[in-house]
Image: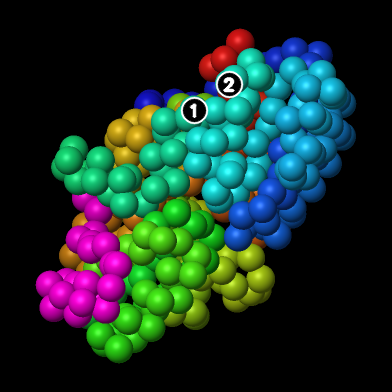
């Protein structure tokens, strides 16, 4: 992945090159409500650009819809399991339908926070120390090994669903039990104290990093999608050397997982100035509170241009 001039991000394809495009959104995951909002925004942008759009709220009739509507390609804006985890990508490949975003392997890997961390760790890419929780005994040993505070996460959810910061073993046990209602695999990580950044990638290029600020304990679901007091800074406030370090680290992290088309990486910076990779999203939010559109605007792309660029990447990658 290389960082090039932002003007190369714009799609040069004609609308006719996209054919009949299915926007896949909604679905059945815990992130359905966010996906409905993202999908509506993408549908509006593509339609206003003149693209032949078929809006599909993904349900049990998906296979019939894809076949009967004579779809040429799919814009995947499903968040979470069933959309970002490789299963939808596998179905579309079986049907011979090109699609936006990463392929089967990268999608499945990025959706699994534990496996992503293991890949990054094996390559020397910094990510917080962690443990997997399956019992109260695991909680006790994780607290002793990692120290407090800690952050608890379902391993296969996004949008901060099921996440909690904990300061004691009792809180850790309670948070593990809550997270386990969303996912059979629960992850606990060292808490990194310091600023948070998110960095988007588009068509092989890294967009301007965004610094996040919130009065909440962390950048949770409410801060992401509801609150009006969340702060976003572009430029991100880092000096040129540290910003380039963050950009290069993001590129390495995405290459390690195999990210294609577009995505977004979440990063913490500790009090010593070191960066720590948290996770990568292969179908990030596209709502009015979402981060990829903000980064794209900083790179000179409005929302419609961003959506067309994502769609164009599916043509370039899969014909």
Residue 148 placement, left or right of 75: left
**Foreground residue among 192 and 150:** 150
Q: In the structure shown, which secondary structural element does the residue marked by tag 2 occupy?
A: helix
- In the orientation shown, which residue stands out farthest toward the left? 145
Q: In the structure shown, which secondary structural element does the residue marked by tag 1 occupy?
A: loop
For the C terminus, the image quarter is: top right
Q: For the residues carrying marks 1 and 2, which lies nearer the camera in this image?
A: 2
- For residue 103, the mark is 1
Q: Count neighbours of disc 2 (C-alpha within 10 A) and say few if under 14, some if 14 to 19, many if 20 or more.
A: some
Which mark sits nearer the N-terminus, 1 or 2?
2
Residues in magenta, as a range: 126-147
- For residue 77, the mark is none
Q: Is residue 270 visible?
A: no
Residue 160 placement, left or right of 59: left
Q: In the rendered view, tell whether residue 163 sits above or below residue 44.
A: below
For the N terminus, the image quarter is: top left
Mark 1 vs 2: CB contact within 8 A: yes
- The verdict on residue 9 being magenta is no
Instruction: Locate residue 49, reporting x and y percent.
Output: 83, 29
- For residue 93, the mark is 2
Residue positioned 40% across, 77% down in the render: 177
């Amino acid at each position: 992945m290389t960082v090039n001039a932002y003007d190369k991000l714009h799609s040069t394809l004609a609308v006719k090159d996209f054919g009949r495009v299915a926007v896949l959104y909604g679905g059945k995951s815990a992130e359905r409500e966010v996906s409905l909002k993202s999908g509506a925004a993408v549908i509006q942008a593509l339609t206003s650009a003149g693209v032949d759009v078929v809006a599909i709220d993904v349900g049990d009739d998906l296979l019939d819809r894809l076949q009967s509507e004579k779809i040429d390609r799919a814009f995947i804006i499903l968040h979470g399991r069933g959309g970002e985890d490789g299963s939808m990508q596998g179905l579309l490949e079986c049907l011979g339908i090109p699609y936006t975003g990463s392929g089967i392997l990268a999608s499945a890997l990025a959706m699994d926070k534990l496996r992503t961390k293991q890949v990054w760790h094996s390559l020397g890419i910094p990510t917080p120390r962690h443990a997997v929780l399956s019992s109260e005994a695991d909680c006790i040993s994780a607290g002793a090994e990692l120290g407090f505070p800690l952050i608890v996460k379902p391993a296969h959810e996004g949008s901060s669903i099921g996440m909690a910061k904990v300061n004691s073993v009792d809180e850790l046990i309670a948070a593990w039990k809550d997270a386990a209602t969303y996912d059979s695999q629960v992850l606990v990580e060292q808490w990194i104290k310091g600023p948070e950044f998110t960095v988007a990638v588009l068509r092989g290029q890294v967009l301007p990093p965004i610094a996040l600020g919130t009065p909440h304990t962390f950048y949770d679901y409410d801060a992401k999608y509801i609150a009006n007091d969340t702060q976003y800074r572009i430029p991100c406030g880092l000096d040129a050397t540290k910003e380039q370090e963050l950009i290069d680290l993001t590129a390495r992290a995405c290459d390690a997982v195999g990210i294609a088309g577009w995505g977004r990486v979440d990063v913490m910076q500790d009090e010593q100035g070191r960066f720590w990779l948290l996770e990568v999203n292969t179908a990030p939010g596209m709502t009015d509170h979402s981060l990829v559109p903000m980064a794209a605007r900083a790179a000179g792309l409005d929302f419609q241009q961003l959506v067309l660029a994502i769609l164009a990447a599916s043509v370039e990658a899969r014909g």
